[in-house]
Image (cartoon, grey):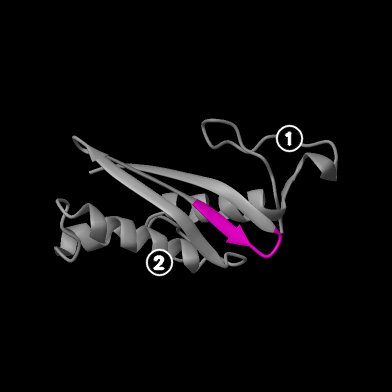
Amino acid sequence: MILRPVDTNGDILPVLSRKEMLSGPAAIARLAEYRLTTYTGEWWENPEKGFPLLARMQEGRLPVGDPDALGNLITAYIRETPGVREAEDVRFSVSGRQFTYSCLVRTEEGTAALRYEAQL
């Protein structure tokens, strides 16, 4: 898998050669991050696709005060990403309304770090 690199705002950066593209575990971890930041209903081409975080919170199926349930939802969603074999060393914390999640994404080619933050 190869992906284009992005800047800190998520804008796609131009590349001059294939070597500048993300590949291997880094590309798979980035794909998992993209999936986490695209919520259900946001993608116009397929509104059913996306991370169901907001929908589950609105339906009351994911209580905001239960960080373990949120951590488990994120881990399960990461595991569904193509190329991901496992999410290891999972850590998450809540500080006020800020939820922070991190893990190591294991792929067939190695591991890469993933970090996700959400305002609750």
Task: Give the residue drawn at x 24%, y 61%.
Answer: 69
Magenta segment: does it hold 91? no
Q: Which residues are magenta?
A: 104-109
Which residue is more in the foreground, 53 or 46? Answer: 53
Residue 52 seen in the figure = no
Q: Which residue is mark 1?
A: 14
Q: CA distance from mark 2 to mark 1?
A: 32 Å
In x, y percent, where is residue 95? 23, 35
Task: Give the residue drawn at x 14%, y 51%.
Answer: 65
Magenta segment: does it hold 107? yes
Report whether 37 appears left or right of 100. Answer: right
Q: Which residue ends up furthest to the front in the rendered image?
A: 89
The disc, 2 or 1, on the residue closer to the chain's N-terminal end is 1
Task: Give the residue drawn at x 49%, y 69%.
Answer: 80
Residue type beneath disc 2:
Ala
Report whether 82 appears left or right of 43. Answer: right
